[in-house]
């Protein structure tokens, strides 16, 4: 195919060949072939930009039509997209009639286990709903830069501990949930705050995570006479992972904890 394309370029010229492929071939291609043609004509960086732009266009269409991220659609790994029947119909309505059957035929149906539900079942509480409410209240009190750092650190720890959360686009769902109560101007400012290595007080993060798990003594970890207990660390290890795995701290504490006679 590559040799044929080179041959066609000499006969038709690059401009005519590109128009032919875009207007006649790509519209009939299955997704794998479509991606192959795009990668062939574009450099990898340009191809990734094209993918990101296409994903952004789909996101804007669905939001404009009133669909909810995380509920009606989610973006997974490798630009994969999970959509509900309602989102599917919305996208089909944006396509010309002659292309709808081809688009629908390429969609794959599968039952995807929800890692959020599995985690909450293990914890025995509505952890993610509670955490979203707590985080929403927390960022009301923070500057834009600190709010962005807080969200970045808490999300990094949750996803590091449970990578499957990426597959259901939990980061997007969590961010949208926590920013809902803010003005549009402030929400955009927090979203646009670019921090490559966000830093935030882990004591506050731990308090909020424990509170979301229903721990009634979460506030004591900030007290000078209190501190975090071994039982609280074990709870945190179920949901969060920082630069140093909490289980390592637990193992060290258990090793040096004096025996109770």
Image: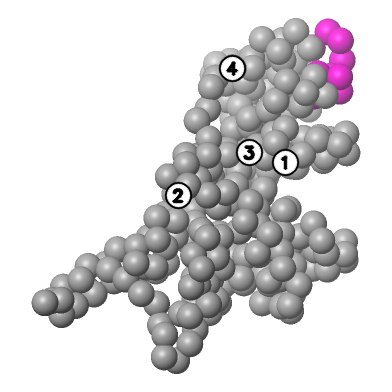
Q: Residues within 10 Å of mark 2 (few under 14, many from 20)?
A: some
Inter-mark Cα distance, 4 to 3: 15 Å
Mark earlier in primary sequence (1, 4): 1
Query: Which contiguous range is marked in magenta?
Result: 91-99
Quarter holding the N terminus? top right
Q: Residue at x 60, y 58 (%)?
A: 131
Mostly what secondary structure, the magenta segment? helix
Q: CA distance from mark 3 to mark 1?
A: 9 Å
| Residue 225 in which image quadrant | bottom left
Sequence order check, earlier mark of 4 and 2? 4
User: In this figure, which residue is indicated by the disc labeled 2?
Assistant: 123
Up-down relation of residue 7 to residue 168 (above or below): above
Q: Please state the horizontal and vertical placement of residue 180, each as a whole percent of the image.
A: 79, 57
| Residue 182 image label | none
The earlier-in-sequence mark between 4 and 3 is 3
**Mark sitting on residue 69:** 1
């Amino acid at each position: 195919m590559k040799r044929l394309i080179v041959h066609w370029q000499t006969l038709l010229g690059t401009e005519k060949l590109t128009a032919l492929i875009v207007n006649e071939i790509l519209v009939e291609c299955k997704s794998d072939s479509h991606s192959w043609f795009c990668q062939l004509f574009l450099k990898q960086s340009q191809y990734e930009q094209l993918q990101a732009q296409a994903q952004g266009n789909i996101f804007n269409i669905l939001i404009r039509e009133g669909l909810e991220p995380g509920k009606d659609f989610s973006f997974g790994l490798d630009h994969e997209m999970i959509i509900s029947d309602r989102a599917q119909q919305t996208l089909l309505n944006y396509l010309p009639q002659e292309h709808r059957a081809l688009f629908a035929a390429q969609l794959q149906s599968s039952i995807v286990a929800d890692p959020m539900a599995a985690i909450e079942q293990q914890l025995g509480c509505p952890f993610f709903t509670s955490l979203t409410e707590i985080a929403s209240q927390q960022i009301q009190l923070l500057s834009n830069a600190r709010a962005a750092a807080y969200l970045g650190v808490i999300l990094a720890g949750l996803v590091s501990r449970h990578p499957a959360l990426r597959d259901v686009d939990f980061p997007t769902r969590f961010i949208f949930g926590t920013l809902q109560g803010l003005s549009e101007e402030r929400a955009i400012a927090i979203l646009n705050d670019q921090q490559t290595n966000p830093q935030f007080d882990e004591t506050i993060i731990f308090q909020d995570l424990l509170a979301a798990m229903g721990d009634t003594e979460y506030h004591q970890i900030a007290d000078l006479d209190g501190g975090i207990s071994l039982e609280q660390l074990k709870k945190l290890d179920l949901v969060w992972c920082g630069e140093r795995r909490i289980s390592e701290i637990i193992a060290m504490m258990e090793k040096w904890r004096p025996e109770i006679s």
